[in-house]
Image (cartoon, grey):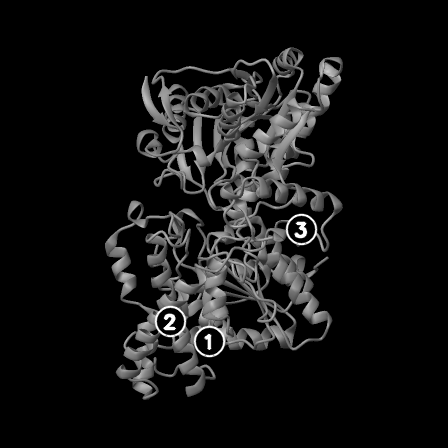
Amino acid sequence: MAQMNMLHAINNALDIAMAEDDSTLCFGEDVGHFGGVFRATSGLQDKYGKVRCFNTPLVEQGIIGFANGLASQGSRPIAEIQFADYIFPAFDQIVNEAAKFRYRSGNEFDVGKLTIRSPYGGGIAGGLYHSQSPEAYFAHTPGLKVVIPRNPYQAKGLLLASIRDDNPVIFFEPKRLYRASVGEVPEEDYQLPLGKAEVVQIGSDITLLAWGAQMEILQKAADLAANDGISCEVIDLRSILPWDVETIVNSVMKTGRLLVSQEAPLTAGFASEIAATIQQECFLHLESPIGRVCGLDTPYPLALEKEYLADHLKIYEAIKRTINY
Amino acid sequence: MSSELYNDGPVVHTPTFIDGTSVEIPELKILKQDGSLYQGCDMPKIDETLAVKVYKTLAFHRVLDERMVSSQRQGRLSFYMAALGEEAASVGGAAGLKPQDMIMTQYREQGVLMFRGFSLEDFMNQMFSNKKDLGKGRQMPIHYGSNELNCMTVSSPLGTQIPQATGYAYGQKMQGLDAVTLCYFGEGAASEGDFHAGLNMAAVQEAPVIFFCRNNGYAISTPSDEQFKGNGIASRGVGYGIKTLRVDGNDILAVIKVMQVARAYALKENAPVLIEAMSYRLGAHSTSDDPSGYRTREEEDKWQANDPILRMKNWMLAQNWWDEAQEKSLFEQLREEVLAAVKVSEKINKPHIDTLITDVYDTPTSQLQAQLEEVKSHVNKYPEAYPFTAGKF
């Protein structure tokens, strides 16, 4: 075990993936010599050469189109989009191409070896173009997997699983935690399962569900609620698509209450999908309506970021409202 | 269908590659670094009044950048992007146009706004995201914009302004206005798909738009030789059927000249022009960047010797339109003004909490109003957690 921050853990996972398979490539804007603007690919060009880890021209649609071509040919591309806010020029290549490559060809061709890494999320005074959480756009696209880790240990295990998974995966990295989140991470190879949520705290009164950077906020709210004698079951969804209905249902059957929190705006966020499914599965076991604590239905603000965010105090208040319903 | 493509070209009977090397792209230079002019050069229209205004704008730009980078280092400002070494590209661009011309910038062209009269307070209020910011504190520092000054508000996503400029210029043409659109972008952004879309459409729809590429050698850490393999960005204009000029971007007189020529051509012919200005990003990409990780000091020093502001100063001195005493007092005065303005703007309150939901639509929806009310009652409950807005609504 070693102490790693999330960037070290991601870099370590990429190193393992590149070492085990000569057809694994890492590329994107500033990814090569410089090692990426956040340094996630630091040292990889030195170790594996410029043909396997390189800078691309500044064109997101090109990066993902190129990656689709590589993956369809049998290579294993790990493409970086510098910020999730800038993924949209590649939307066509992701939504119409990567997601449908296997389906449209009757499995004659696929891009299952594709992994797209991209830092997402707010809380860094980044304003509307360096803070977005676009997971719901991609969750609406059958054929993709969408994965979001909450800490360095999760990041390494889930990234390795994403790279080796035989489906195109978008791996969103909570950039607020890149250096802030530090923890014990095994130096050797390991994987964590895709499509499986994790119960990180067992409780009995209410289920709290989130993913990525929002997990830290959720835990803070759960701690506040514990002071009031409220026992929270805290779950990290980890995979947005496909998502682990069973783990959430089992928890809600037990607690009778569910609160979902996401950084993204409320309307049509992934929390809405979860709420719809859980009310269907657990209707007679629910003690109160399923709550959502989310960003407002506005672009991500700058000066008023604190007011906008689904912070621990808003979640704490929502826990009390749900319990006292 | 274009019949020319089928009839006019030379015919060969063995496969013959073409690679464009026969096309030479001349670079316009008017002013030497020592302030003297190249012999036989074609001067822009510039008199003493304009020259002094241009020079003072360049000086303001240099001082503002220096002070704001150091304010960021002191932790007073979250972020900044300087245009060190590239000031002539933006200031010269605005100086070669008329005030009614629309300018769409990328994000390193503060000089355009400075030339058009965006005040020191306007700059400060944007950077400190306070309630006086025209953009209502919603964008990161340096994302300026002003409808009154015909400067479109900066958007961070790269290259998106390029096809927009084509559309804007087409609208100007349709309304018969004596106005063009100037669109700035870097050589990195020229890799985006929007660049192709914007230039091709401008040629086809015959829009009076001037595309101005600041080729400063780097897109963050990526050097231009890892960005493209052709002869710069100018060579692409030929492919799109767009009249193209290359200019020394550190030569303020040459930049003003190409802009004056491009404007006249675009208006008269209702056609786009592509300009590639050769320069160098002397500073970091932004205050979040450290260029020592990807380039050498020697390379920077070489370009330091091409300082566009010093070059213009040398010319101004030779013209007897400027002297060292004026120089000293201007820079001293600017430094004091900027420092004083920082102290004022950083203390001004953040925008009102109601601005959380305004401008998402023309009028806030009922759902947004309900969300705002919820936030307000939450802030009232935990005032210490929301110091910018608590007790201020």
- Crowdedness near tag 3: few (<14), some (14–19) or many (≥20) residues, C-alpha within 10 Å: some
Q: Name the residue under label 2.
A: B337
Given the image, on which type of amino acid does mark 1 rest?
Answer: Ile
Q: Residue A277's x, y, as percent?
A: 71, 20
Given the image, on which type of amino acid does mark 3 rest?
Answer: Val
Residue at image location 34% in from the left, 40% down from the top: A33
Q: Distance between the residues labelled 3 and 1?
A: 38 Å
Image quadrant holding the N terminus of chain B, namely bottom right
Q: How far apart are marks 2 and 3 (CA)?
A: 35 Å
Compared across the picture, whether B78 is left or right of A319 comes to: left
Tag nearer the camera, 1 or 2? 2
Compared across the picture, whether A279 is left or right of A123 comes to: right
Answer above or below: position of A90 versus B312.
above
Q: Residue A288's x, y, as percent?
A: 71, 21
Q: Mark 3 points at which residue?
A: B360
Q: Could you say which is closer to the camera, residue B247 or residue B230? A: B247
Task: Establish whether labels 3 and 1 are both on one chain.
Answer: yes
Earlier in the chain: of badge 2 and badge 3, it is 2
Q: Residue A22's x, y, as percent?
A: 40, 23
Tag nearer the camera, 3 or 1? 3
Q: Name the residue under label 1.
A: B256
Which of the chains bears the disc numbered 3? B
Answer above or below: position of A55 versus B31.
above
Compared across the picture, whether A203 is left or right of A35 comes to: right
Q: What element carries label 1?
A: helix
Answer above or below: position of A206 versus A217.
above
Compared across the picture, whether B308 is left or right of B10 comes to: left
Answer above or below: position of A12 versus B239.
above
